[in-house]
Image (cartoon, rainbow, N blue to C red):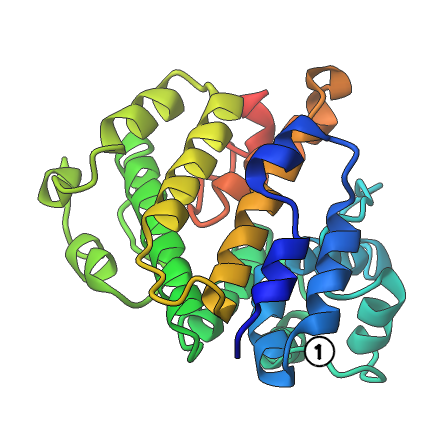
Amino acid sequence: MNYYYLLVALPSTKDFQENAFLDIERIQAFILEHLTETDKQAFRYTLYRNDNKNLLSILKKKYNWLENPIISFHSPAAFTYQELESGIEGFFTLPKYMQEFLSSEKEHYRGSETENHLIRLYYQEASELENPFLKSYFEFKRDLKNILSAINRNNYHLTNSSSFLEGGLVYHLLKNSMGNDLRILESYDFIDDIQNLIKTKQFVSLEKKVDEILLKFISSYPILEPFSSDAVFARFLQLSIQYRWLKWDENLGLDHLNQSIDWVLKSATMPNENTAEIFA
């Protein structure tokens, strides 16, 4: 499918950066309106990251998982608050990985173990997509999260690999290695920077560094057809990452920081006494 007119109508990353008022949800809706049904299904996986957060927020409130949980709605997202609520009750069809998660976790909250389970199922399904760009993108994100897990395992002297996302060479290299195991990943030139940011608890900078790494991956991916679905997905991911930082306000305080950092490091199982709140 040739998406020349769709791509021409989308803002460039430069235009988007210079016009913070541009509406990412309107861009999302415009893209969905012009994709084929197959490409729509694939595109939604770029949105499910926020749907995962929204689903957990609703469950925390609905089943009293946490006392006075912070309820916020993250966008861009594939589903409305009402659709997720209906999906929890079985009246609206959610993705298979969400259905599997709800069937085993809906009424039982085990902290990071429960939330890691949702992320694990999400990446497992996303890494099996037939679209070559999205498949590669989610495999790279999976590897990046596993590197974060390995760094935290070293920093906090954890002994198990339960926090790792299954699949890929990085997973197989790291899951059973001990000690300063990141030396086996010399080809990843960002590891030292990430280690330093985690060690010095610069977690806003860590978030930015992770997004910079993702933007570099997207921009360097060899898209062979300039007006293909791959090009559309890549543009949207670039815009959505930019949008997240354009709306960032350092004066929002600890609540925003705690929520954000929790998701940057969610792939790592921390000791009980070391929750995301200590990083503020």
Specify whether residue 83 is in view: yes
Location of the C terminus by quadrant is top right
Residue 119 location (% of width, % of height): 52, 60
Residue 62 location (% of width, % of height): 85, 60
Residue sitting at x 64%, y 35%: 15
Residue 16 location (% of width, % of height): 65, 36
Q: Nearer the viewer, residue 185 or 44?
A: 44
Residue 6 location (% of width, % of height): 64, 63
Mark 1 residue crowding within 10 angstroms, few (<14) / some (14–19) / many (20+): some
Q: Nearer the viewer, residue 243 or 106?
A: 243
Q: Is residue 157 above or below residue 217?
A: above
User: On the rendered structure, is 264 left or right of 68?
Assistant: left
Q: Nearer the viewer, residue 172 or 140?
A: 140
Residue sitting at x 46%, y 19%: 202
Residue receiving disc 1: 94
Using the rendered view, name the quadrant where residue 80 is placed.
Answer: bottom right
Using the rendered view, name the quadrant where residue 65 is placed.
Answer: bottom right
Q: Nearer the viewer, residue 15 or 23?
A: 15
Q: Is residue 78 above or below residue 198?
A: below
- The amino acid marked with disc number 1 is Leu
Specify whether residue 244 is in view: no
Using the rendered view, name the quadrant where residue 278 is placed.
Answer: top right
Residue sitting at x 15%, y 56%: 173
User: On the rendered structure, is 42 left or right of 211?
Assistant: right
User: On the rendered structure, is 242 left or right of 209?
Assistant: right
Secondary structure under the numbered disc 1 in the rendered image: loop
